Image: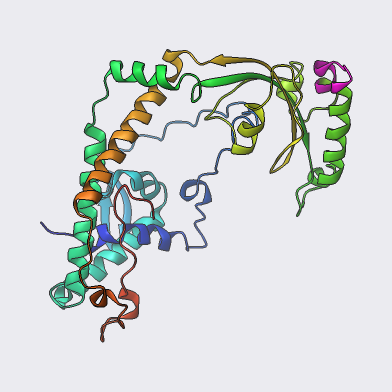
Amino acid sequence: MKFSVVTVCLPALLGFALLWPQAPLSAQATPPQAPPAAVVPPGAPGPIPAAPKAVPPDTVVMEVDGKKYTAAEVDQMIASMPVQYQPQIRSNPKFLTQLFVFREMEHMAIAEKLDQQSPYKEQLQFARMQYLATMASNNFRTRLKVSEEEEQKYYQVHSGDTFRAAKARVIYLAFRPPNAQTDEAKKKPTEAEAKAKADDLRKQLQAGADFGALAKANSDDKGSAERGGDYGLITQTSSSDAMKKVVFALKVGEISEPVRQPNGFYLVRVDEFVTQPFDQVQAAIDEYIRSDKFREWNLELQKRYDVKVDEPAYFQPRPMPAGLPPQAAPSRPVVPGVSK
């Protein structure tokens, strides 16, 4: 099996391409992390992007080093890359530039037979082994079977904890970011001011004030404020740890202490605790069981090949072998399915 250095170094390819200043890719290369659903309500859906214009396969779409390439040829080139990288490569020509650079370097290395020399030969063998191990790991997980009987059993066991949810009302008080830049952000109260307001509102609520009225008048979460603070369900998987710890410790009708989140404070009241219906969580259950089975399989492999040391002196730290290029210094091996 031929093992291409382009495949081994593809993450590096993407990293190099991101350094090109004329082609910023923050949107494609680093997708924004969505805030916890129980902390920041989802905004209105954005416009559906238009489908890309169809290009006939025989259309010349680019030129590299004096050679023209058709859409079909570029499609084939992109298709040879791992699926998870294809959208990024297709959306920006600079990724293809670096791909051609890597290919030229690969040809240079092969011409000089570096792939047959130590330590490069051993490093290629290790990279191949590691890549195939990841493929085997992913393949095992994909082929796992989960029956509905297993899902129903899991649901019955965990319905009182994992699938317990709270119907809640909230008042959200945003505060100014520490390094506020925009005029709008600077208008927000400081964290101390927001906390003081949250404490005052909590006292009013405990004294019998109407939650809905206070939410409409004060909450910065406009979506729930219009509904009198009605936030919907807070589940075990849709909220931050800090929020879950507070919410699921409350009694029905009790007002929480202000819960600090990255951009504001929440006051929460639980109206009712419910159990999510099976059909709403079946997909999540399937993933939970699949993850458990995968973890058990991996632990069995770890146990089977556990190293029992007979001579500790042999495993004492040693200096790096002479002649090993600095850029080729071995990194910590990554074992599929095992946390670093």
Instruction: Give the percent coordinates (x, y) of residue 28.
Output: 47, 47
The residue stretch that appears in magenta: 206-215
In this picture, residue 94 sits left or right of residue 215? left
Residue extending farthest to the bottom is 322
Instruction: Give the percent coordinates (x, y) of residue 83.
Output: 30, 43
308 or 218, which lies in front?
Answer: 308
Q: Which quarter of the figure is the C terminus placed in? A: bottom left
Instruction: Give the percent coordinates (x, y) of residue 175.
Output: 79, 42
Vertical arrangement, residue 19 with respect to residue 266, above or below: below
- Number of disc labels: 0
Residue extending farthest to the front is 310
Question: What kind of secondary structure does the magenta stretch mostly adopt?
Answer: helix
Instruction: Give the percent coordinates (x, y) of residue 306.
Output: 23, 56
Give the colour scheme shown.
rainbow
Q: Which quarter of the figure is the N terminus placed in? A: bottom left
Vertical arrangement, residue 284 with respect to residue 69, above or below: above
**Which quadrant of the figure has residue 286?**
top left
In this picture, residue 274 sits left or right of residue 109? right
31 magenta-colored: no
Residue 190 visible somewhere in the drawing:
no
212 magenta-colored: yes
Question: Who's the residue at 45% across and 16% down the image?
Answer: 280
